[in-house]
Image: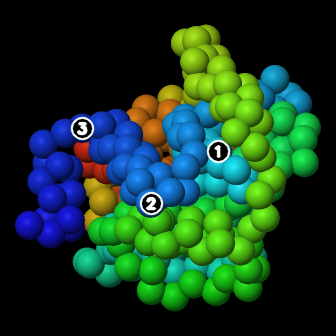
Amino acid sequence: MSKGLFDKILDNMFDAAWVGKHGEKLTERELRLVKLFGRKGKVLRNVYVPKDNEETSEIDVVYITQKGIFVIESKNYSGWIFGDEGSLYWTVMLPNKMKNRFYNPIKQNQTHIKWLEQYLNDDIPLFSIIAFSERCELKKLTINSEDIHVIKRDRLYATVRSIWNSAEDALDDEKVDLVYKKLKSLTKVDDAIKAAHIESIQERYKKREETPAQQTETTDTIKTEEIEPSPDVDVSDSNSDKCPKCGGDLILRTAKKGENAGKNFYGCSNYPKCRFIQNV
């Protein structure tokens, strides 16, 4: 049975929140293979790094090793992926030719690394990896920086191995344990911090000029076939593209039909499993 078929079965059996977490677990599983072949390290998932505005930046997966910290952003799209390192948005095209935009994951991980570096306040090498699901095809990507790695998840072992072999040792075992304990404390956040993180995501999508009538309007009935990609819209923080309901990626869309025709909104990439809608 192929991974693609297996993922489709999972999508039908479990809800969107489970599927999102499953992707991160698969990334963690690939890292076990890395450890098995001698490149040992410690793995943490869902690390809430504090920012200087009392909010948090959530990192999907970190791998703490003697070479440094691998900061991994996990994406679970299916379809064809198109993107450029410098663009604000990338595009995913589904088999039915529908195109949607999502925030540039390279910029997203750069923000994660920025706050992680500030939090650690130490000279520790940080390696950026964007790991997409095996269900997608990285059709056309323009990446010029050698220190940025955009891959499919099944290439994670080879990518870590390549970085490992070219990097100098930076941490001894004692320092690895120290960093692990420091970051592990950021995974055990209470519900209040998680709620604040979700609230900050929601608030970031609210348009200040929105009228009271628009605020009460719902777009839950918009169907997938009624949307199309929207023009680029500036996003002030890369963490704002996470669905607060299931943790999936939020995609900028435009309603094509009905009362909301022409209006932009953010819809969850796990639709129809997750029907979260946020007006812009």
Do labels 2 and 1 touch, CB within 8 Å? no
Left or right for 80, reference 88: left
The residue sitting at 86% across, 28% down in the picture is 53
Mark on residue 64?
1
Task: Please tell me which of labels 3 and 1 falls first in the chain.
Answer: 3
Q: Which of label 3 and label 1 is nearer to you? A: 1
Q: Is residue 76 above or below residue 59?
A: below
Q: Which mark is residue 15?
A: 3
CA–CA distance in space, label 2 to label 3? 34 Å
- Horizontal side, residue 209 vs residue 245: left or right: right
Q: Earlier in the sequence, mark 2 or mark 1?
A: 2
Quadrant housing residue 188: top right
Q: Secondary structure at mark 2?
A: loop
User: If you read the primary sequence from the N terminus, does the residue marked by circle 2 or circle 3 appear first?
Assistant: 3
Q: Amino acid at mark 3?
A: Asp
Residue 139's disc is none
- Kindly identify the residue that appears in the image at 58 percent across and 79 percent down: 83
- Give the residue drawn at x 58%, y 12%: 190
Is 195 in front, or is 141?
Answer: 141
Residue 158 position, x and y percent, is: 49, 72
**Badge 3: few (under 14), some or many (20 or more) residues near its Cα, within 10 Å?**
some
Residue 162 pos. (x, y %) = 60, 74
Task: Give the CA distance from mark 2 to mark 1.
Answer: 16 Å
Mark 1 belongs to which amino acid? Ile
In the picture provided, is 71 more to the left or to the right than 53? left
Give 123 or 197, whichever is nearer the viewer.
123
Q: Amino acid at mark 2?
A: Phe
State the residue position of label 2: 37
Q: Secondary structure at mark 1?
A: strand
